[in-house]
Amino acid sequence: MIQPTQSCPDAVTTLFNLPDHQVISASNDDAAGIRVVTVALDSPTACPGCVVLASRVHSLRTQRVRDILVAGHVRLMWAKRWLFCDEVLCARKTFLRIDPAGPRFARSTTRLKETLKDAVIDSGRAASEVAAAFKVSWWLVNTVVLAAAAALPSVDLLEPTRLGIDEHRYRSVRWLQDQLSKKWTRYEPWMSTIVDVDTGQVLGIVDGRDSRGVGAWLKAGPTTWLCCIETVGIDPSAAFREALRENLPDAAVSVDHFHMVLLANDMLTQVRQRVSREQNGRRGLKTDKAWAHRQLLLRGYDTLLRRRQETPR
């Protein structure tokens, strides 16, 4: 049976799991407590000038790059080969093998950057936490996230149909003193974020959490863009509701699931406390069944035991 010619990877290459690369050497650095792995491309490469396959090595240059954790911290040494072009009519005599997994002048592998981006954007982890987990600098994680954000399409070119608005406190409360009156003023560091619910992309960030900031952002948007919005999800905020009533009167407003459940649980607790005071003339005690099973009233149906679901009491 005829099979295509290809290299047979050894166990170390398979475990390292870097496509189209072969592990040349692997050793332990006991002083640093890490493993040193040297890899090189294992696939044929064509000359970029004449597109003829080349295999004769001109020189070998080793470069240290950062990589993901493979059963612990690994110091990756990249063996990059300069090859001869044996085509007589080709103007290029030597060239460097193009490696998508580690582009030229790159200090980190492509799979490391993708892993860092997924950890921050998809998993929602803090940049400092991701940097500590992968043993890289915070600046590298921040650079990867900024590059991913720059690759997103422009907000002006989008036509979202569902928006989400929520406020965030990005630092602790601060007191600022006026230099003239020497009066101290309490500063609440709040900001409001507007996102596209379908894609999760951030569309805008405004200062504060009142109706003026969100309303000004909506007024600055083009009319054709605002007409496409059908639903806006907010928390039970009167300020956000006022901004939407003025700028998006035709859009449906919905409250997120978390705050709806929270309000329902608070109302159920108030009713339980009121009924207990009316019947017993006092607040609930440990001997009262209503007080002893107060947490059971707030449990979700899907978290109850099967016998509780079948025969609720």
Image (cartoon, rainbow, N blue to C red):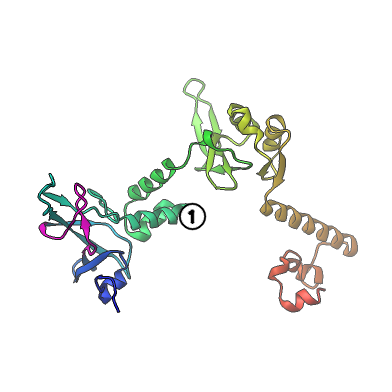
Q: Is residue 165 above or below residue 40?
A: above
**Which residue does the numbered mark 1 point to in the structure image?**
122
Q: Is residue 178 left or right of residue 300?
A: left
Q: Is residue 36 above or below residue 148?
A: below
Give the residue furthest to the top: 180
Residue at x-position 33% and y-position 61%:
68
Q: Is residue 272 above or below residue 172?
A: below
Residue 115, given in percent of the width and then of the height, sits at 39, 57
The answer to whether residue 176 of the structure is visible from this angle is yes
Q: How many marks?
A: 1
Work out whether residue 226 or residue 273 is closer to the camera in this orientation and state it: 226
User: Does 46 lie within the magenta span?
Assistant: yes
Question: SS at mark 1?
Answer: helix
Classify residue 8 by image quadrant: bottom left
Residue at x-position 53% and y-position 26%:
183
Q: Is residue 169 left or right of residue 236?
A: left
Classify residue 33 by image quadrant: bottom left
Amino acid carrying mark 1 in the image: Asp
Residue 241, given in percent of the width and then of the height, sits at 70, 37
Work out whether residue 291 or residue 306 is closer to the camera in this orientation and state it: 306
Residue 237, given in percent of the width and then of the height, sits at 69, 41
Residue at x-position 11% and y-position 54%:
86
Q: Is residue 17 above or below residue 115?
A: below
The answer to whether residue 189 of the structure is visible from this angle is no
User: Does 136 lie within the magenta span?
Assistant: no
Residue at x-position 52% and y-position 44%:
201
What range of the chain is rendered magenta? Answer: 39-59
Mark 1, other Cα within 10 Å: few <14 / some 14–19 / many ≥20: few
Give the residue furthest to the right: 279
Work out whether residue 138 or residue 82 is closer to the camera in this orientation and state it: 82
Work out whether residue 303 or residue 112 is closer to the camera in this orientation and state it: 112
